[in-house]
Image: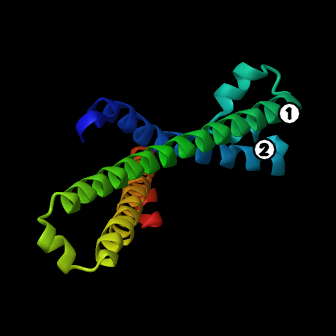
Amino acid sequence: LGDDKSKVPFVLIVFLLSPLIEMIGLGLIAPFVTIILDPQKISDTYLSDLFYIISPENNYKEIVIFISFALIIVFIFKGILSLINIWIIEDFNLKRQFKLQTELMKTFQNMPYIEYVNKNTSEYMETIQNLVGTYCGVLTSFLRIISEVIIIFGILLFLVFIDYKILFFVT
């Protein structure tokens, strides 16, 4: 990791916050839809205590406005976290690509002259450009898969925490 060791805690926080924000977003959708479809069920949702704090007289409009703003804020925050997540992965990838290309170029420049001229220069260019690019593309895909697996694992862990029977329904 080299110079990036100091960024590891930040990366972990972003990767672990993503499933939490996903769960909050998913958790707000069901009460929102329930209240929109049937306003009489305000007190039947698992957020009814929160609704009473927001509006002691269970004012339908105040509760819908609150949940709407909460959903918007959660999904904006989720989008920002996703962008940060992508930025972290791409930044890591581009730094690795630059470092690999630089090291390969130094290696080719330090080769004995006879060995260097015996190969076609297009092989060197192909190694520096195409193979390193392919490697970094695979690395990016792998890091994105890891990020998505962390999110899925976090959601499944949340489902187990809420009700383990839901997990068997999901899987």
Q: Quadrant of residue 63?
A: top right
- Location of residue 122 in the rendering, given as x and y in whole percent from the top left corner: 34, 77
Q: Which residue is mark 1?
A: 60
Q: Is residue 77 left or right of residue 12?
A: right
- Quick one: label 2 or label 1, which is nearer the N terminus? 2
Q: Is residue 112 left or right of residue 71?
A: left
For the residue marked with disc 2, what is the amino acid?
Ile
Decide: marks 2, 1 in contact (CB < 8 A)? yes
State the quadrant of the N terminus: top left
Q: Quadrant of residue 41?
A: top right
Q: Name the residue rendered at 39%, 65% in the picture.
A: 133
Q: Is residue 6 above or below residue 34?
A: above
Q: Secondary structure at mark 2?
A: helix
Within 10 Å of disc 2 (Cα), the crowding (few <14, some 14-19, many 20+) is some
- Location of residue 129 in the rendering, given as x and y in whole percent from the top left corner: 38, 67
Q: Is residue 17 left or right of residue 12?
A: right
**In this view of the protein, can residue 92 be seen by the observer?**
yes
- What separation in Å lies between label 2 and label 1 (alpha carbons)? 8 Å
- In this rendered view, identify the residue nearer to me: 153 or 104: 104
Q: Which residue is mark 2?
A: 35
**In this view of the protein, can residue 160 be seen by the observer?**
no
Q: Name the residue rendered at 50%, 45% in the picture.
A: 87
Q: Is residue 8 above or below residue 116?
A: above
Q: Name the residue rendered at 41%, 51% in the picture.
A: 94
Q: Name the residue rendered at 72%, 23% in the picture.
A: 52
- In this rendered view, identify the residue nearer to me: 14 or 56: 14
State the quadrant of the C terminus: bottom left
